[in-house]
DNA sequence: GCTATATATGAAGTATACTTCACATGAAGC
DNA sequence: GCTTCATGTGAAGTATACTTCATATATAGC
């Protein structure tokens, strides 16, 4: 699912490794999230949003993603 | 994880079944979320928040849950 | 008492979030 | 060319989100 993790991480001048440590996951997890290979858990999404002082909704473009969800709901759950 | 699903559902006069249909999951899933047996995916959390016109952060008390997370992080991921 | 509706649990299956380990690539500095 | 650092992938394992089916209990209307 579309997200702003990489964009915000770079803007903050952090490496994937640094972000991973900050939110207590492996760097592989951060890489996978940035490449949109899967979606984070609710808590992880919140931790990342917190690091960048934004909301889960903003970090994961939830309002913008809504129409896509409505079309392909089962694919995204 | 502490949440307001049941509280908001009842305030909205909906049954578990009705909420389940509204967000495209089984009623078993709604029951489990209300009983806090597991946490929803990011998308499901957002769909439910949308029904009640609130944010994921409010629905799941994320700011209030933060200290708990800091203590028992691994348990909650 | 019977039926219907809402809420709840057990069990077993599938999908996916997250892990570690091993390895590959590209860019930068020497 | 060698090293270092950041980024990326494959594979295989564990944990958990979500499913269906079967069943149970409580309440309300008849």
Image: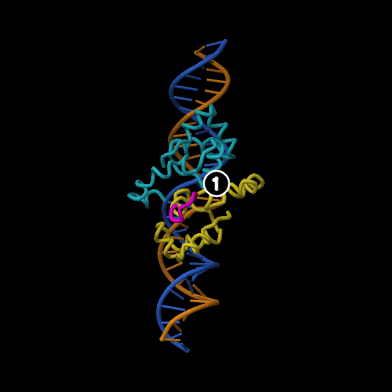
Chain colours: A cyan, B yellow, C blue, D orange
Quarter occupied by residue A20: top right
Between C19 and B19, the one lying in front of the other is B19
The residue shown at (40%, 61%) is B21
Count all numbered tags in the image, as a single digit.
Answer: 1
Between A75 and B47, the one lying in front of the other is B47
Q: Quadrant of the N terminus of chain A?
A: top left
The residue labelled by disc 1 is A43
Instruction: Give x and y (percent) for residue B4.
Output: 54, 57
The extreme left residue here reads: A71
The answer to whether residue A21 is left or right of residue D17 is: right
Magenta stretch, residue numbers: B50-55
Instruction: Give x and y (percent) for residue A7.
Output: 46, 31
Instruction: Give x and y (percent) for residue C12.
Output: 48, 63
The extreme right residue here reads: B71
Mark 1 burial class by Cα count in 10 Å: few <14, some 14-19, many 20+: many
Check the image and report above or below for A58 versus B23: above
The residue shown at (37%, 48%) is A69
Between A12 and B28, the one lying in front of the other is A12
Check the image and report above or below for A54 versus C9: above
Query: Which of the chains bears the disc numbered 1?
Result: A
Instruction: Give x and y (percent) for residue C4.
Output: 40, 77
**Chief SS of the magenta region:** loop
Check the image and report above or below for C5 versus A6: below
The residue shown at (40%, 59%) is B22
**Residue B35 lies in magenta, yes or no?**
no
Callout 1 secondary element? helix
The answer to whether residue B70 is left or right of residue D29 is: right
């Amino acid at each position: 699912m579309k997200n702003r993790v990489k964009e915000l991480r770079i803007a903050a001048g952090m490496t994937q490794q640094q972000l991973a440590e900050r939110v207590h996951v492996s760097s592989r997890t951060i890489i996978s999230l940035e490449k949109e290979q899967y979606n984070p858990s609710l808590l992880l999404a919140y931790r990342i949003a917190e690091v960048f002082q934004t909301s889960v909704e903003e970090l994961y473009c939830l309002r913008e993603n809504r129409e896509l969800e409505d079309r392909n709901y089962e694919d995204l759950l």
